[in-house]
Amino acid sequence: MEKEHAKKKRERIPEIDFLRGLALLLMVWHHAMYDVRYIFGIDAFAFQDSYWFYRIGRPIVLALFLLVSGISTRFSGNNLKRGLRMLLFAVIATVLTAIVEVITNWMGVIFFNVFHVIALSTLCYVLIEHLFIGRYRASPDGILDVELSERPERKPGRPVMNGILDVELSERLERKPGRPVMNGTLDVELSERLERKPGRSVMNGILDVERQKAKMIGFLIGFGAFAVAIGYVIAPILPNVTRNPLFVILGSPVAGVQTLDQLPLFPYLGYFLLGSAIGQTLYASGEPFWKGERGLFHTVGRPIRFMGRHALFVYLFHQPVLLSLLWLLSQIGLF
């Protein structure tokens, strides 16, 4: 059973990898054009300054990337660890670009970009999940019974899987003669005799939190939509430049320093939380919609899915690679 669970955990959702990889590919292409025009000063890709590109095209790609990142919270084994790791990378990106800017005075600094947004959004999701689910830990099927299973005495090394008490454990509890324990699940009548909080129904030894999860999904949708709306409301009234860290997080460039890859927390926090709600609903079973492993689309999409599977490393290293390649091209006189 443990091997099957580990195998299932390693399985990927191909359509999510494809969408993440597609958004990442478009983002890398945008950064390549930005580097050519604004860092190396080549008069090319002038359409980046147009309204449709900066105000429509770029936000759509970023919204897609944040939506997919939010959906991925459904499949993360530890969202807290994931969020803290992203926060660490965000801090590293800020420190490294600041050092390069001090040394070279030509590149600029990443103060608050997609790394920072994903990190804070993931930690926000963790907080929301904790507030609605409490100290319980969900199984892959969305059923949990930590509180119940921790109360009775059980032997070391006998885990409680998916909220179902082990047969050996259940047989050590007092129960009426003739009331069998089926498939390691405590009988309803037995489970109701265990101490539990008022209003918490225990069915077959399983504490069902689907109602709490439904409330959490509703909150994710409501708060996510609010965060998206508030982002577009406050954008026109933000200062053009600032030294205030709060305004930097909300999207204002830093005064006196070239700001690289700026991304406001709002509305993109909202897109992330809406993606989390999508992950909890459309992917509640944990099964992919795209199950085909043959065909032209599957073959053509393989490189994009590869990028999607390794999005963190692609995003982390694509700019150093791009800048190095462009510098080499400039040295040999190609531009």
Image: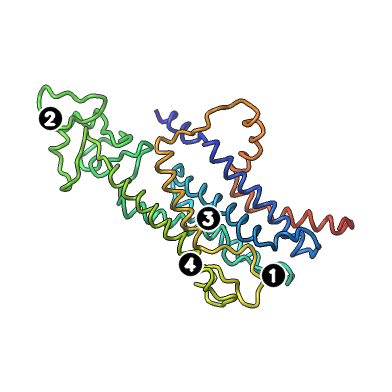
- Place residue 264 in its image quadrant: bottom right
Discs 4, 1 touching: Cβ within 8 Å: no
Residue type, mark 2 in image: Arg
Vertical placement of residue 147 versus 222, above or below: above
Real-space Cα distance between discs 2 and 1?
71 Å
Answer left or right for 181 relative to 80. Answer: left
The Cα–Cα distance between marks 4 and 3, rounded to whole angstroms, is 28 Å
The image shows residue 35 at horizontal and vertical percentages of: 73, 60
Q: Choose mark 4 or mark 1, whichever is in front.
A: 4
Q: Is residue 101 left or right of residue 192?
A: right
Which residue is farthest top?
Answer: 178
| Structural crowding at the residue carrying mark 1, measured as other residues with C-alpha within 10 Å and reported as few (<14), some (14–19) or many (≥20) | some
Q: Secondary structure at mark 2?
A: loop
* CB atoms of marks 4 and 3 within 8 Å: no
Q: Which residue is mark 1?
A: 101
Front of the two marks 4 and 3: 4
Q: Is residue 138 above or below residue 62?
A: above
Which one is closest to the eye, mark 2 or mark 1?
A: 1
From the top left corner, tell me how far across and down residue 326 is, in percent: 79, 56
First along the sequence among labels 4 and 1: 1
Residue at mark 4: 233
Question: Residue pushed farthest right?
Answer: 333
Which quadrant of the rendered structure holds the N terminus?
Answer: top left
Q: Which residue is mark 3?
A: 86
Tag shown at residue 175: 2
The residue that appears at 56% across and 27% down in the rendered structure is 292
Q: CA distance from mark 4 to mark 1?
A: 33 Å
